[in-house]
Image (spheres, rainbow, N blue to C red):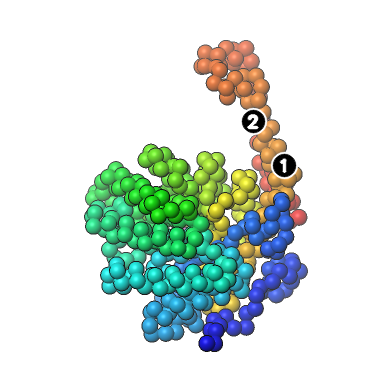
Amino acid sequence: MVKKEFFPGIKKIRFEGPKSKNPLAFKWYNPKEEVAGKSMREHLRFSIAYWHTMKGSGADPFGAPTWMRPWNKSNNPLRIAEDTMLAAFEFFTKLGVDYYCFHDRDICPEGETLIETNKRLDKIISLAKKLQKDTGVKLLWNTSNMFSNPRFAHGAATNPDAHVFAYAGAQVKKMLEAGLELGAENYVFWGGREGYETLLNTDMKRELDHLAMFLRMAVDYAREIKFKGQFLIEPKPKEPTKHQYDFDSATVISFLRKYGLEKYFKLNIEANHATLAGHTFEHDLAVASINGMLGSVDANRGDLLLGWDTDQFPSDIYQTTMAMYIILGQKGLGTGGLNFDAKLRRGSTDLEDLFIAHIGAMDAFALGLKIANELHKDKVLSDVIKNRYSSYDTGIGAKIEAGMVDLKDLEVFILKNGEPKQVSGKQEMLENIINQYLVG
Ligand code: XUL
Ligand code: CO
């Protein structure tokens, strides 16, 4: 049998260094290069998002698909599913990325019944397993799409109809089995339509109780079948519902703690979701990280002028540096990785644009990693921050931190010591120093 080639003319992407003019070469991402005792490849754990890269069509609410992909040629949807999987692994290996992620509905279309759908899934999962074995590419995470089918119009686990809740449960059960079969390192819950449009028809407390119950069932079933992947929740504040329950890191962490689920979950932080919540990317990463719950990253960027999830490829070195600073600060993402939940602009219609976009994103994170490592090594920020809080290291501050003083003691202290002195935060100085590191 002749092996099909979906990206003819594109060879394995190589590192050529910052001076290269070849759009199909890495300028900074050199997988073998060591940074802080580990290779770039081990630090960055890049992953491809099947839904955008393989299934994206360029369609938007105003117009038809613009990307005519060679793996979509057949009239048979199951043949398309297989061709897409073959093309996907060709793409992963040519690009030199070790991981991928998918929703159940990305890898094959639903059938008429659950049985039919699961049979289709079994077939495509066995193809994925074979291709993983042949290429060494691994599954970073899988997830269930519980938002596209009309049955989920009012949510999945938070649907007012228990029948829909049950359907969602059956779907997650199958995807946990798929995760086990394919050795998924994590399992993601992004709360598709888990949210509400109006309180006029919504029992918010009951919906949140149901969501927690659903997650508990997933944890229990994973234990039963011995699925060892890390569970992740991906916060997002809005879109598609007006108010998504998993608003941001802080909201998700407090939800998990309320229901006693915090030891089973970490967070998958997406840049564009953080900015939609009115935060910076690094804010939501930091909130997850200081709570020991930063598990993985959906690496993309938004557009500050637009209020929706544009899912653009990350290219802003400042942002990738700040992200890698936090990730290095917690000694890596463990089983997580940097998943490019990003899509081409509708007008980027050449097949090679898929490579070019990912190359740029990988280079942006490679640079971010190198610069963040220098910032850590030179203690640029950590020394300033340590010094900024040094009044808590001795005297009254140390007593406050140790819980040894009360409000009366604080009054005595002020009566004796008077007004505190103004201390500069040195923000502009630090911004200037960061620019020096960025330019090198
Ligand atoms: C949606 C989003 C999803 C999740 C996986 O905004 O980010 O693609 O990453 O369901
Ligand atoms: Co995402």
Q: Which residue is mark 1?
A: 379
Residue at image location 45% in from the left, 42% down from the top: 263
Residue type, mark 1 in image: Lys
Q: Quadrant of residue 300?
A: bottom right
Q: Quadrant of residue 351?
A: bottom right
Indicate which label's residue lies in the foreground, 2 or 1. Answer: 1
Vertical side of 327 occupied by 389: above or below: above
Q: Which residue is mark 2?
A: 389
Looking at the picture, how far across and down is residue 401, in whole percent? Answer: 58, 24
Q: Bin the neighbour count of mark 2 within 10 Å (Cα to Cα): few under 14, some 14-19, many 20 and up.
A: few
Secondary structure under tag 1 reads loop
Q: Quadrant of residue 439?
A: bottom right
Residue at image location 76% in from the left, 55% down from the top: 440
Q: How many marks?
A: 2
Looking at the picture, how far across and down is residue 268, in whole percent? Answer: 49, 53
Q: CA distance from mark 2 to mark 1?
A: 15 Å
Residue at image location 73% in from the left, 70% down from the top: 16
